[in-house]
Amino acid sequence: MSRPRILIVGAGFAGYRTARTLSRLTRGRAHITLLNPTDYFLYLPLLPQVAAGILEPRRVTVSLSDSLPDVRLVLGEAERIDLDDGILRYTGPEGEEGSLSYDRLVLAAGSVNKLLPIPGVAEHAHGFRGLPEALYLRDHVTRQVELAASAEDPEACAARCTFVVVGAGYTGTEVAAHGQMFTDAQVRKHPLRQGMRPRWMLLDVAPRVLPEMDEKLSATADRVLRQRGVDVRMGTSVKEATHDGVVLTDGEFVETRTLVWCVGVRPDPLVESLGLPMEKGRLLVDPHLRVPGRPELFACGDVAAVPDLENPGSYTPMTAQHAWRHGKIAAENVAASLGLGGSRKPYRHRDLGFVVDLGGAKAAANPLGVTLSGVPAGAVTRGYHLAAMPGNRVRVAADWLLDAVLPRQAVQLGLVRSWSVPLDTSSPEVARVAGGPGRRADARSGPGAALAADTDDGGGPGRAGSPDEPAKGQPGSGTTQVRPGSGAARPRSEPETAKGRPLAGPPGSGHGELRSEWETAKGRPLAGPPGSGHGELRSEWETAKGRPAAATATAAGTAGEPVRSRPVGEAAKNQPGGEPARNQTGGEPAKNQPGGEPAKNQPGGEPAKNQPAPAPPPHPPGPDHPAPGPVKRTDVPDDPDDFTKGDS
């Protein structure tokens, strides 16, 4: 008899717990497959500490392959589910499509950022649901403080050091608390203008901080935030987000370069496509976490509306505690439905209390109903997190110890750019890659998402000069990239993007030719001869400098912005090619360059085997037709030091 197939979608708190429990219960008697966009489980409660530089990113992740024995991991995002045929179709991280069949399906896809119809928010705000967003915020805040320290304009300094957090729930409160401590530590190394200090604002339409918690805990958190210098404004939110700041609902305009969106979460849009009964975006299930009328379908976590048996008529809230407990019950009921042990159990819970980490030794907690604050609350909070984490406990504890005795390392790693983490996305755990595989229709970003790029004016959300302006040194965020003087480039496929090889047309079409493997390794793109509208071959020196081959003057007038007429050898500023590299005309020719040793199978080089020999030149070398080789430049000074002044 063949083993039953169990498919789990999502590896958050609910999905990870389901997979781990099923692996223990089935003991190899079932095929368990876990579909997830990443290869790790993310412990979300500690994400604010990653953004504040306390914990390294890998500390809050747990490898799925290492911690889930007998579970097959498939990287990808679910696209659609055929409930009648029992098939799920997905898209892999490199754009490949696949399908998975199942006998039991557990939906635990989790939640994404909750959006409100506020103008400018999708373009200028960033969420806080995944590791890429935390890494971006850490770099962005560090950059703003460093730029503010060197700013001469007091207004620019104040705008860069103003950080607005919308949403005073668990996440927003912890982000503001840790953020204020992080920036205060930075300005001790990079002092601001006289009388200035970083300003963090926490906004929410609710009447108090942490409205879902006990009033005593709410009052404790509010007091700690205000003592630390956080500008807490309840009953106030954002009316509009702009390039230069935000307009509040009370009419005040706050200049800022940072808008962190922690308003709340919404269930993953995947469940909406099933056409099954819903409750405020969540899939209705019975107390056993099974979808009525679908005995093979289970749901848990944030995508499931689970009846709260302790409070009849209501549903369990979307919290990590409930998702973790859902996973255990879902696994036991799936195993029972397949006859692999145990009996079905309804989901019941007992409130064990809540903890909120406010940074340093400060926290708010009520374990088992006992209200705590200060150092005791901080000890309970960190102890709870260590106990709840499924791995990395020693590493996390070590990072906490080092943070207590050593200063934090506030540096920009540049791993995630602003256009990589759009607010309107159904995959906050995956950074967007230019030219990467497309997402399902309802998962695509909003009108301004992924278009904003980090620039040297602060790199804030949506700070690009125009919607189509790519980030410096980054691929364009659109589907195509037009280069001046070279014609419109065609879209690149995912393999080509990974290899760094742009698609192009044949010579004379305005596109570069395809590069061979050898040329890719050398960093030398093929190109047409001078005057054909294509860039010339690059020397290794130019490749090392990262300068693409410059289009010749005859390329002016083709698609893109024409290069202004300049003397030969003088490169137009801010144009492809940059300044002329050494070993070009006027110096010793580089290998595989005109005048040097010709490249094999290249124009002017050694002919390929079994190919006819090239025709001799029409004119022998002479005064009017000099032989290839070094020539004296007349447009640069004789002093070689003057030739390199522009390279610094």
Image: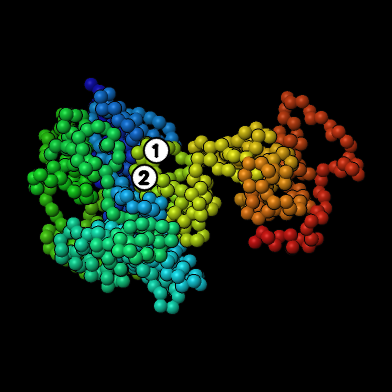
Callout 2–callout 1 Cβ contact below 8 Å:
yes
Q: Amino acid at mark 2?
A: Thr
| Residue at the spot 32% in from the left edge and 58% down from the top edge | 238
- 273 or 325: nearer the viewer: 273
- 160 or 367: nearer the viewer: 160
| Residue at the spot 78% in from the left edge and 44% down from the top edge | 595
| Residue at the spot 23% in from the left edge and 67% down from the top edge | 222
* Dot placed on the residue nearer the N-terminal end, 2 or 1: 2
Q: Quadrant of the N terminus?
A: top left
Q: Which residue is mark 1?
A: 439
Q: Is residue 105 left or right of residue 605?
A: left
Q: Secondary structure at mark 2?
A: loop
Residue 67 in sight: yes
Mark 2 burial class by Cα count in 10 Å: few <14, some 14-19, many 20+: many
| Residue at the spot 14% in from the left edge and 37% down from the top edge | 286
Q: Secondary structure at mark 1?
A: loop
Q: Which mark is residue 425?
A: 2
| x and y percentages locating residue 541 in the rendered image | 67, 51
